[in-house]
Amino acid sequence: MAKNSKEAYKIENEQFLKEIAGQPGVRELYNGILYRVVSSGAGKSPNAGSIVSVFYKGSLINGKVFDSNMSGKVPDAFRLRELIVGWQIALKNMKEGDKWTVYIPAAYGYGPRGVHGIPGNSTLIFEIKLVKVN
């Protein structure tokens, strides 16, 4: 991407978050990390040392899915402190059984550099279902 198109992409992603923030049912967790409760659970919440079992789907603002385990029968397990900061913040506020849509600004995702398949300065959209906390 040329410098101007990288800047335009960054602005487009920031504008997307501003628009989402104004939608009904969308709340802010921390510094621009937004979420919408899809369904609520009643289990326990994780802490930094927890291992979380989740179903998830990650996409960009254009709808391109970059990762998902939603079609599986078994959730993936992760140590919370090893996840991107946006996930850590969201999951610490979730309870077992919760399903949220989480909107993560680039600063709490993969930043200006991005990772394979995810351009720098990308807002990340995750559907996350917290199945189990260990």
Image (cartoon, rainbow, N blue to C red):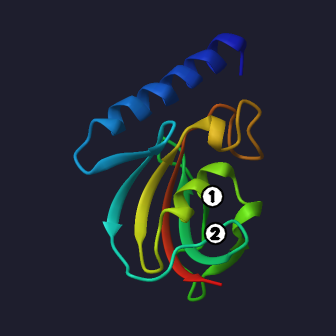
Above or below residue 128? Residue 105 is: above
Q: Secondary structure at mark 2?
A: loop
Q: CA distance from mark 2 to mark 1?
A: 9 Å
Give coordinates of residue 87: x percent, y percent. Answer: 60, 57
Q: Look at 53% across and 57% down and name the residue there.
A: 90
Task: Tell me which residue sits at (56%, 38%) in the image.
Answer: 105
Which amino acid type is marked by label 1?
Gln
* Apparent side of residue 126 relative to residue 52 in the rendered image (left or right): left
Q: Position of residue 109 (x, y in %)?
A: 65, 44
Q: Amino acid at mark 2?
A: Asn
Q: Is residue 61 above or below residue 9?
A: below
Q: Residues within 10 Å of mark 1 (few under 14, many from 20)?
A: some
Quadrant containing the N terminus in the rendered view: top right
Near-viewer residue (57 or 128): 128
**Quadrant in the rendering for residue 51:** bottom right
Q: Nearer the viewer, residue 68 or 127?
A: 127
Residue occupying image coordinates x 43% and y 80%: 97
In the rendering, at what x and y percent does residue 78 appear?
Answer: 71, 73
The residue labelled by disc 1 is 88
Of badges 2 and 1, nearer the viewer stands 2
Q: Say whether residue 49 is left or right of residue 56.
A: right
Q: Nearer the viewer, residue 120 or 46?
A: 46
- In the picture, which quadrant includes the C terminus? bottom right
Location of mark 2 (residue): 47
132 vs 25, left or right, is: right
For the point 73% across and 38% down, the residue is 114
The first of marks 2 and 1 along the sequence is 2
Secondary element type, mark 1:
helix
Residue farthest to the left, as pictured: 24
